[in-house]
């Protein structure tokens, strides 16, 4: 998701006739190459939806085949009913009214927009019936969660079928899901169906929908959307009947149809969500990525912005190629970029973005949301608990991509992320990144911790282990953990295996505490041709140090001080003097320079600025 705080810190489906369904190396329930005890649940959804575009209500029939690949007996299951958040008095509404810095998109005249919704404007999902293997079972709706107590517990290895009928209403566009957004897009159908909650080795993840993002079970989706025939539909999956529906345009087939509706039939293999959007005025373009997916573009025919959408398309091809090269190959045959929603938000095989933007902004939001495909969709860490792994890593790689594709030529593409992090530290409102995403005291603290500090985690990891090792780490992380819901330890273990260094200290201090980095030059004393330099560790977080000495004649000399607990050092990319290790408990460290090369003009800690040292004033003498 491209968050509103980006602007503060300058960070600023499916219309293919393919009927094949990909398989992946790690489908639900199969063993991990990393851990032979690894397991995950699996779902198969079949849904038939009847949409009324006049009152924005729809009826759904859902068949869910659920495989319990866990070693546990399940006595309950839980569904997310996300649209229930858009009702006066919901947890999302109350949180919006009480947080000190509410999201401006969700406010109007100082009030929560949710609090003023009328009955025909709210969102809801109402479950009408639910059966387990053909037998009716009891359930209770509690806010945005459907609680289901099972009369017949699901045994390890057992597969059961849940059949559900539900009614729903799409709310006014307020956050992610909604109708008639500010740019006039009719339907942004996100988080729109009863979605089974994830169960893993930590138990159930039936988090209420209060404001943050999502976690889901891998599976296959077969979805039929019955909608007014004037509408064009785009989103997740492969369209199975393009000739029958004519891609939503006025073909002879549609003109001869006696029905007012068309049935769009999509199949999506091995995904953990299904999203779609629809509008009667969508322009639909495609562009093929060489040796990659077919890109689809759905946008309103607004003359002021149409040219930007046309220019976006070859840039989107470059972005797809960049991420596939730098992280891992995109494994599906299509990806859609769709105008809709309330900003920018990532989904399975697609993204919804607002489209009335300047060209640079349109490319920027596309770069960020497309990058989520790798970290939110294909790796799919738990965003509620480890939001920085998705938002931060996405921000890092999209800033890298923009630097190349848009010729920004920044020495440090993550420079604005560092600024954001420093702002958070100085604000006094920082909380550890291990904080649950809904439990941050304010939106600012969440946003910077997730996006900026999460991005600095990777950029600074490159400082610790070397940029080449970081590049290899990202590829290894993707190869080993795509389709597996990785945890924080998984990225750091990928880095350890790539670099040969011990890095648990880095993960602990950066993500589980608010310890800061602050090193300084305490004193410099000359004695003949020898200069004695004493450094000081002021902050609690340890780091290895790059030191650059500049002589009066312009010659520069590099020194490197390894951190003892790393049990090694990063590779040298330029000639350097390797000094003895610095053990963390010692507050000072002294080394000598042979100043026969000339008078010393300058001594600087971390000359490239890749270490997030909160006080750089004392880094230079």
Image (cartoon, grey):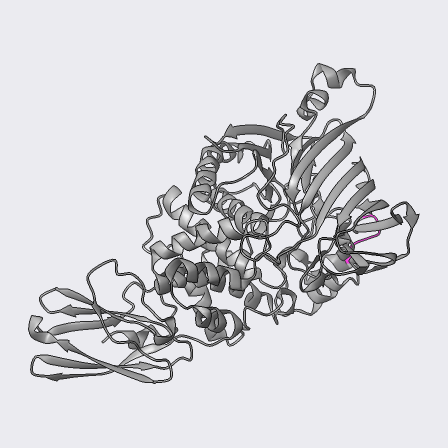
Q: Where's residue 1, x and y in %?
A: 57, 52
The foreground one among 206 and 410 is 206
Q: Camera-side residue: 454 or 153? A: 153
Image mark count: 0
Whether 224 is drawn above or below 348: the answer is: above
Q: Is residue 155 above or below residue 17?
A: below
Q: In the rendered view, would you say 421 is above or below 152?
A: below
**Residue 418 appears in the figure:** yes
The spot of residue 472 in percent (x, y) is: 40, 52
User: Which residue, as the protein is rendered here, is positioned at the far front?
Assistant: 36
Q: From the viewer's perspective, is 232 left or right of 375?
A: right
Identify the image quadrant of residue 185: top right
What x and y, as percent, mark residue 592? 17, 79
Residue 362 lies left or right of residue 269; in this view the side is left
290 or 491, nearer to the observer: 491
* Residue 600 coordinates in the image, percent (x, y): 13, 74
Start and end of the magenta stretch? 116-120
What secondary structure do most residues of the magenta stretch adopt?
loop
Q: Residue furthest right?
A: 136
* Of the pair 524 and 68, the residue shown nearer to us: 68
Residue found at x 75% / y 42%: 45
Residue 117 counted in the magenta span: yes
* Residue 457 among magenta residues: no
Q: Is residue 87 visible?
A: no
Q: Give the residue displayed 47% in from the left and 35% down from the top.
A: 317
Q: Where does the C terminus fall, quadrant-wise? A: bottom left
Is residue 549 shown above or below 207?
below
């Amino acid at each position: 998701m491209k968050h509103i705080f980006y602007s503060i810190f300058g960070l600023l489906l499916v219309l293919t006739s393919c009927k094949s369904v990909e398989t992946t190396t790690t489908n639900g329930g199969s063993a991990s190459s990393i851990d032979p005890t690894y397991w995950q649940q699996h779902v198969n959804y079949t849904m038939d939806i009847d949409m009324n575009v006049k009152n924005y209500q729809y009826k759904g029939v859902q068949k869910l085949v659920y495989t319990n690949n866990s070693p546990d007996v399940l006595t309950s299951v839980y569904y997310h009913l996300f649209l229930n958040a858009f009702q006066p008095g919901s947890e999302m509404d109350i949180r919006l009214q009480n947080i000190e810095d509410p999201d401006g998109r969700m406010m109007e005249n100082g009030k929560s927009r949710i609090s003023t919704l009328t009955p025909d404007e709210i969102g809801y999902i109402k479950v009408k019936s639910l059966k387990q293997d053909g037998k009716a079972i009891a359930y209770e709706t509690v806010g945005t969660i459907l609680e289901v107590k099972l009369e017949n517990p699901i045994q390890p290895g057992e597969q059961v079928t849940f059949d559900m009928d539900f009614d729903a209403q799409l709310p006014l566009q307020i956050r992610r899901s909604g109708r008639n957004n500010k740019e006039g897009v009719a339907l942004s159908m996100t988080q729109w169906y009863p979605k089974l909650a994830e169960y893993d080795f930590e138990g159930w993840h039936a988090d209420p929908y209060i404001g943050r993002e999502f976690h889901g079970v891998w599976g296959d989706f077969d979805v039929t959307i019955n909608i007014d025939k004037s509408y064009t539909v785009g989103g997740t999956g492969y369209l199975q009947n393009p000739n029958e529906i004519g891609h939503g345009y006025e073909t002879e087939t549609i003109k001869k149809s006696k029905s007012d509706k068309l049935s769009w039939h999509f199949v999506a293999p091995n995904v953990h969500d299904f999203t779609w959007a629809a509008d009667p005025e969508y322009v639909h373009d495609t562009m093929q990525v060489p040796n990659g997916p077919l890109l689809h573009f759905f946008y309103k025919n607004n003359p002021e912005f149409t040219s930007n959408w046309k220019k976006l398309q070859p840039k989107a091809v470059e972005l797809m190629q960049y991420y596939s090269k730098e992280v891992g190959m995109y494994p599906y045959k299509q990806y859609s970029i769709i105008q809709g929603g309330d900003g920018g938000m990532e989904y399975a095989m697609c993204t919804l973005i607002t489209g009335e933007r300047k060209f640079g902004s349109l490319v920027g939001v596309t770069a960020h949301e497309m990058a989520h495909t790798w970290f939110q969709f294909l790796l799919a860490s738990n965003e509620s608990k480890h939001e920085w792994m998705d938002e931060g890593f996405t921000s890092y790689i999209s800033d890298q991509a923009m630097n190349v594709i848009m010729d920004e030529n920044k020495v440090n593409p993550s420079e604005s992320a560092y600024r954001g992090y420093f702002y958070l530290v100085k604000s006094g409102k920082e909380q550890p990144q291990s904080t649950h995403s809904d439990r941050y005291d304010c939106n600012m603290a969440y946003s910077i911790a997730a996006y900026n500090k999460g991005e600095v985690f990777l950029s600074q990891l490159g400082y610790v282990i070397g940029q080449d090792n970081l590049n290899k780490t990202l590829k290894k992380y993707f190869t080993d953990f795509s389709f597996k819901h990785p945890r924080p330890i998984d990225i750091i273990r990928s880095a350890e295996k790539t670099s040969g260094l011990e890095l648990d200290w880095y993960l602990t201090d950066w993500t589980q505490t608010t310890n800061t980095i602050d090193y300084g030059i305490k004193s410099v004393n000359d004695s003949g041709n020898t200069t004695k330099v004493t450094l000081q560790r002021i902050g609690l977080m340890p780091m290895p140090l790059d030191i650059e000495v500049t002589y009066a004649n312009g010659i520069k000399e590099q020194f490197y001080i390894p951190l003892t607990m790393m049990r090694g050092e990063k590779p040298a990319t330029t000639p350097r003097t390797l000094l003895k290790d610095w053990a963390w408990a010692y507050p000072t460290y002294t080394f000598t320079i042979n100043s026969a090369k000339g008078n010393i003009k300058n001594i600087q800690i971390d000359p490239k600025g890749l270490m997030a040292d909160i006080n750089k004033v004392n880094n230079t003498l």
